[in-house]
Image: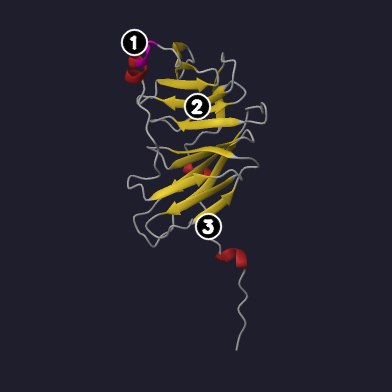
Amino acid sequence: MFELNIDPESLKPKLPNRSDLKPYPVSCYLEYRGREDAVTSVSVEASGQRIASGVDDILNSLLHSVTGQDVLLLNTGCGNEEEQKRTKELLSVEMPVPDDSGDHIIVGSREGKLCWFNMDLSSKPYKILKLHQKDINNVCFHHSYPLFATCSDDCTAYVFHAMVYSDLNQNPLIVPLEILQGHSSTNGRGIMDCKFHPRQPWLFTAGADSVVRLYCH
């Protein structure tokens, strides 16, 4: 008989180096200010040139995504038909899905946990990650890059690399990339929403501190 000396660490799967997974958002490039109340939502139109943000006082602003200049300011509670029609023409908002098939789903919880479901294999989570110290308010996937992000009331947004393989025997690859900070807590709330740019590896975040931030690579 003989004894095998195996380092348990050597049995763990090797994760790629973060530098090999670029590009992904790492720092704040631009802040959109001017709102007085918490920014509860942000949406990006299909070309990525304009974003819309919604605030608690029901005012919605349409901004140029790179310059931050106001394009249109709407009061959705009493906006006229012309304003509503123009908003619909300018914006194309879609529900993000992890991959083209929609078989992989991520869910954020009030306990700061992220659950990844592979609906082809099981109704139970494939992976559960304890990320944030407070509630997760939104999760989003990028349509062009293998990225997804979470945002929370702890004033942080987490960015991950996520690769889904066609081989069902191979588990999805999930690699933590960056923790984005900069928003401040207001009335116990932090980052209310996050959305990726449709064409670039950029992330927009909407905060209870009345600020929308653009993070770039």
Residue at horizontal 46 percent and vertical 19 percent from the top? 66
- Residue 3, percent across and down? 62, 82
- The residue that label 2 is drawn on is 41
Secondary element under disc 3, as helix, strand or loop, is loop
- Residue 114, percent across and down? 54, 47
Q: Is residue 43 magenta?
A: no
Tally of marks: 3
Query: Is 98 displayed left or right of 24 in the figure?
Result: left
The nearer-to-camera label among 3 and 2 is 2
Query: Is 25 displayed left or right of 153 in the figure?
Result: left
The dot on residue 82 is 1
Residue at horizontal 58 percent and vertical 22 percent from the top? 38
Q: CA distance from mark 2 to mark 1?
A: 22 Å
Residue neighbourhood size for the residue with mark 2, other residues' Cα within 10 Å, grouped as few (<14), some (14–19), many (≥20): many
Identify which amino acid the numbered label 3 is placed on.
Lys
Relative depth, front residue between 39 and 30: 39
Q: Earlier in the sequence, mark 3 or mark 1?
A: 3
Q: CA distance from mark 3 to mark 1?
A: 55 Å
Residue neighbourhood size for the residue with mark 1, other residues' Cα within 10 Å, grouped as few (<14), some (14–19), many (≥20): few
- The residue that label 3 is drawn on is 14
Identify which amino acid the numbered label 2 is placed on.
Ser
**Residue 207 shows up from this direction:** yes
Residue at horizontal 47 percent and vertical 41 percent from the top? 148
The nearer-to-camera label among 3 and 1 is 1
**Residue 17 shows up from this direction:** no
Identify which amino acid the numbered label 1 is placed on.
Glu
Q: Taking 119 as reference, is 159 above or below it?
A: above
Q: CA distance from mark 3 to mark 2?
A: 37 Å
Secondary element under disc 1, as helix, strand or loop, is helix
- Residue 207, percent across and down? 58, 26
Q: Earlier in the sequence, mark 3 or mark 2?
A: 3
